[in-house]
Image: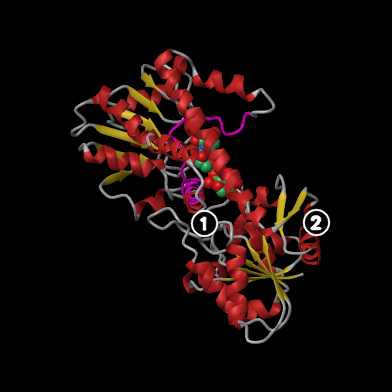
Amino acid sequence: MNVCVIGVGYVGLVTGAVFADLGNEVFCVDNDKRKIDTLNRGEMPIYEPGLKEMVKRNVDDGRLVFTTNLSKGVKTAKVIFIAVGTPPKPNGESDLSAVEAVAKEIALNLDDYKIVVNKSTVPVGTGNLVRNIIEKHRRSDVEFDVVSNPEFLKEGSAIADCLNPDRIVIGVPNHHVAMALLELYAPLERTMLITDVESAEVIKYASNAFLATKISFINFIANLCERAGADVSLVAKGMGTDSRIGKEFLQAGLGYGGSCFPKDTLSLLHTAKKFGEDASILESVIAINQDRVPRFVRRIVARLKPLNRKVIAVLGLAFKPNTDDLRDAKSLEIIKALQKKNAVIKVYDPVAMDNARSILKGVTFCKNAYEAARGADALIVVTDWNEFKLLNLEKLHQEMRGNFIFDGRNIYSKERVESAGFEYHCIGKQ
Ligand code: UDX
């Protein structure tokens, strides 16, 4: 099938590569010429395991094309995916200006029946909005349909998630259009759920907000455990073995970051308020998450005060492991708070260092965890990269001036760390 994907951000690029890998002819379009040039040189604008190889394979075979020529992409395709960004406005509302601009461009280039699919995360009602824009700007009465097909991929496992999704949600205005999408996704042999457009739009936000709720809930329980002398890891295990609850997303820590949960919870909150619904449940989820870093920093200050000129090694900058993404990363928030108190910051991350260099000022970038630890008074774990779990703790201790570890992701066992000579502080246990 001929497919056009507009927007080569995380979702668009991975989706385009996977559709091409399934044998479709794919045009990936973006108005950022530098990004398209980068991709045409075979370089990836993001770090994602397996992506580079998949892109190369399909570009070499001629099934995947990167271009700024939206008109050609739209005219060639039967199905057009909108996968542009929907960043938050200051009030939490999703900024749909890129979606609106693309809808208008599609309308101006509509020469034949097309299926326009919203893959961007967009608030309920956006399908209608896109339909209205296209109707207004199309040059003739040529037919089209607007579909909602939200993406659930996670950074760091995006290709695998895209190839093996738990479910494929397809929100359609009629059954005829559903057939084309079913045909496109059939090779994946996964569960497909056909709904109306509005329900599909709500499913995406409801899913992300529910997962964010699980995280904030376990973080609330972690706070309680710290006071009551319980161990949140054991509590999460005990809860997670109940199949109705499930063990996923019950890892207490510094809270959720990244490009989705923070913005999607705020957007859903905004939508709920717009419809006049009480959303205090979401307000609590967001408030708990926003207090994770201040609470962690308060604990660091309580043990190290005054922080003035104290050297702190930060392990992990990416918002989670296996990505170089720093969007809404807890590391940035923590470093800013510590720098405000005049702490000296040394950092190390396995893959996010290049991205961090343009964002973080006044920190020392180190080649590895041991170099970051050298001369430090305290070491803090911000991202749960596997390589940090396997560090030689005795060696780490020798490198340091002080003996504090503040583990924001609970990657170590207290006994092990203490036997290496450290004073250990982690989340949700004493
Ligand atoms: C998320 C959704 O999982 C995905 O379905 C959607 O398409 C996009 O948003 P992503 O942001 O890539 O994906 O990361 P995810 O693995 O879900 O983690 C989000 C954040 O939650 C990270 O900051 C992570 O550290 C945190 N987290 C996750 C926890 O603090 N505890 C957990 O138990 C799980």
Q: Amino acid at mark 2?
A: Pro
Which residue: 58% across, 68% down? 129
Q: Which mark is residue 46?
A: 1
Q: Residue 15: image x %, image y %?
A: 65, 59
Which residue: 29% across, 28% down? 298
Is 183 rendered above or below residue 393?
below
The answer to if 251 sits in the magenta stretch is yes
Q: Residue 182: image x %, image y %?
A: 79, 59
Q: Coloured how?
A: secondary structure
The residue tagged with tag 2: helix, strand or loop?
helix
The magenta segment: 247-269
Which residue: 40% across, 39% down? 368
Q: Which mark is residue 310?
A: none
Query: Which one is in front, 205 or 252?
Result: 205
Query: Which one is in front, 12 or 144?
Result: 144
The residue tagged with tag 1: helix, strand or loop?
loop
